[in-house]
Image (cartoon, helix red, strand yellow):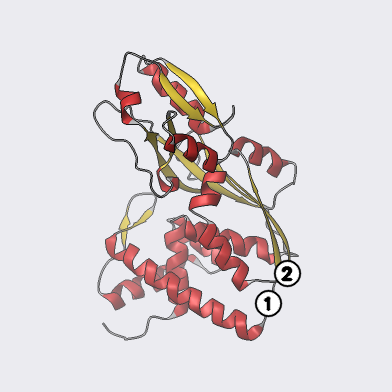
Amino acid sequence: MASSILPLEVLRSFSAIAETGSVTRAAELIGRSQPALSLQLKRLEDQVGRPLFVRDANQLRLNDDGRRLLGYAQRMLTLNDEALAYFQGPVMGGRVRFGVPSEFASTVLPQVIGRFSRLYPGVTLEVTSSLSENLIQGYQRNEFDLILALHDRPGAGRKADKAWVRNDELVWLGNARALQSTNAPVPLVVAPEGCIYRKRMLQVLKQTGRRCTIVYTNPDLSGIAAAIDEGLGVTALARTTVPKGQRALQGPDIPELGSISVSLRCRRSARNPAIERLEQEVRAGLL
């Protein structure tokens, strides 16, 4: 290596590029010029002696070395931010209204939200869990400052829509025999009407000529997980939100569910910088 020190400023730029998959979007996110970020990325790859991204036509994707470095970078940036927050005191206040699907609130985001609360104890964080359909409508009515929402078309509008974060594969959970048997209807454990997972399960089973019946409905992930544990039926979730102790069903007789897309919409406000800061933390946590 040409230098034994990884500058925090460069690691923050690298993290932003990894979050957005684009130097242009990363520059907009952190308020720097695109040429400056491109130069920082080149110098970082020269310093570590390895490429960090796979460069597609329209997106930068982390390779194995990039993912490893991102883990180090996030820990270094976290320690730096926590140290500054401790000695400088809480510099942010106000309230942030955050809407998120329950499965993400329970499995993916607890550490992100906990870290944000430790860094900015002066911010009142109000988290509401609901179906994506309800969250989008609430955001349009100005009931939320920030929402994480799921969309039925994977990658829909990813070039034009800055809210797009990632695509996520849907997987089956529960008793595999319920899906492999063709003699009885598939028993489904679902969220209420309007849930993307519910809609996709019904579509796929209809397309494959399988009968099904809804045996249990619950709006919360914990209730659905409990029903699956009791063997009531099968359900679908985004792969990244599968609860601990559960395993995605696989096999030639298991119909594929495809993917969905995840977006993060932020109502930026110069009077409340905590909203944008939480957006950055959540994006990093979803990588």
Identified at 59% across, 36% down, the residue is 219
* Whether label 1 touches label 2, CB < 8 Å: yes
Disc assigned to residue 93: 2
Tell me residue 126's x, y (percent). Answer: 69, 56
Name the element at disc 2. Answer: loop
Please tell me whether residue 140 is drawn above or below residue 253 in the rendered image: below
Q: Is residue 28 visible?
A: no
Q: Which residue is mark 1?
A: 90
Residue type at mark 2? Gly
The tag on residue 238 is none
Q: Is residue 30 or residue 112 the one in the foreground? A: 112
Crowding near the residue tagged with mark 1, few <14, some 14–19, many ≥20 C-alpha atoms within 10 Å? some
Q: Residue at x 44, y 22 (%)?
A: 203
Drawn side of residue 251 relative to residue 128, left or right: left
Q: Residues within 10 Å of mark 2 (few under 14, many from 20)?
A: some
Query: Mark 1 and mark 2: span between their CA atoms?
Result: 8 Å
Image coords of residue 242 (percent x, y): 42, 45
Q: Quadrant of residue 45?
A: bottom left
Compared across the picture, whether 249 is left or right of 156 comes to left
Q: Position of residue 189 (x, y in %)?
A: 48, 29
- Indicate the amino acid at tag 1: Pro
How many numbered marks, from 0 up?
2
Q: Quadrant of the C terminus?
A: bottom left
Screen quadrant of the N terminus: bottom left
Q: Residue at horizontal 29%, vertical 75%?
A: 48
Above or below residue 178? Residue 287 is below
Q: Please indicate, yes or no, whether residue 208 appears anywhere in the rendered image.
A: yes
Residues 27 and 227: in front is: 227
**Quadrant in the rendering for residue 67:** bottom left
